[in-house]
Image (tube, rainbow, N blue to C red):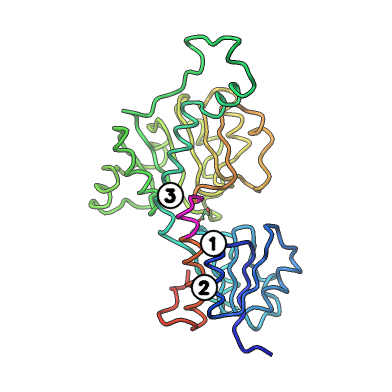
Amino acid sequence: MSSRKKVWVSRPLFPDVLARLAEHAEVQAEAVERRHAPEELRAKLAAADGAIVGLADRIDAAALEGNARLRVVANLGVGHDNLDLAALTRAGILACNTPDVLNESTADYAWALLLAAARRVGAAERWLRAGHWPEGMRFDDWLGVDLHGRTLGVLGMGRIGRAVARRAAGFDMRVLYHNRAPLPEALERESGGAEWVDKATLLRQSDHLVLVLPYTPESRHAIGAAELALMKPRAVLVNIARGGIVDDAALAAALREGRLAAAGLDVFEGEPRVHPDLLALDNVVLSPHIASASADARHAMAELAAENVLAALGLVPGRPPAPL
Ligand code: DGY
């Protein structure tokens, strides 16, 4: 029997990253993207020393039941609400994620959604592809809302939030943010001169609002009917954080009733299911959780996850990653 450590990779990954893992460990990588049934997930984890998992893999006490072998779980993502950290800690398993390497690409994508939603790019493209242009277009068709010179709000001013805020300077925007506590002044200066305000003020004064906060029981429905009611009717809301932070039904109602101009959503409560009321609207840009999906960022995330596993298993020199 091989004495090499075993690493299970729950989804297809870049071949060069798998090859790097295979230099040091026996690798079992899934060749097809799919959801694993609970029993299969438990069996795969029980047969591995290390695992690289995606956000669709829920690693909780049930997934770890009877597991005496697994030492490290590396999440392909900075958000880790799919990991039950208490259960992992109880089982003596190190959990790690992929911070930093995706900050800039994810911030770029927040702006892609903001611009697309504000200027109605998705709806206009659908109209053009449907062949309507030759039927004629009025001068006052397709009117969007401006970004330049307006106020950008950022809810959740961590590393990605700050990268979103920094980009606002290019649009001559004032930046407001809300976090549990204000950032040190130097960080505010580096973040487009962002000013801390309480949450209600952020909602009332932002012309456009980007959500970049982690999903926790406290942040569930942080934007619901009451919060949406405080926002400007010409505002655009962007969620690149996690589904569930927004009450999707309440958002759909606000968009349908013209209480909000538009939204750009990369994440959804209960994804990959998308609330049917959102699917029925034209003033929302929807994407399938791809904010970090630039070629470079995704490769860097995969590399970091692989190096985390190798270091945690003591297969390469260097310190194991700090626990989450
Ligand atoms: C993350 O890193 O948490 C992203 O949502 C994954 O793309």
Find residue 65 and report its horizontal and vertical position in percent: 70, 76
Q: Main secondary structure of the magenta part?
A: helix
Q: Disc 3 marks which amino acid?
A: Ser
Of the two numbered discs 3 and 2 in the rendering, the one whose residue sits closer to the viewer? 2
* Residue sitting at x 55%, y 62%: 14
Q: Image height check: is 106 above or below 51? A: above
As helix, strand or loop, the secondary structure at mark 1 comes to loop
Asked whether 261 or 33 is in front, the reply is 33
Q: Disc 1 marks which amino acid?
A: Leu
**3 falls in the magenta region:** no
Nearer-N-terminus badge (2/1) = 2
Of the two numbered discs 2 and 1 in the rendering, the one whose residue sits closer to the viewer? 2
Residue where numbered disc 1 is placed: 76
Q: Exactly how many numbered labels are in the figure?
A: 3
Q: Quadrant of residue 129?
A: top right
Residue range corresponding to the magenta coloring: 293-299
Give the alpha-carbon distance from disc 2 to disc 1, as whole Å: 16 Å
Residue 105 is tagged as 3
Residue where numbered disc 2 is placed: 20
Could you classify mark 3 by the number of other residues whose Cα lies within 10 Å: few (under 14), some (14-19), or many (20 or more)?
A: many
Q: Is residue 234 left or right of residue 2?
A: left
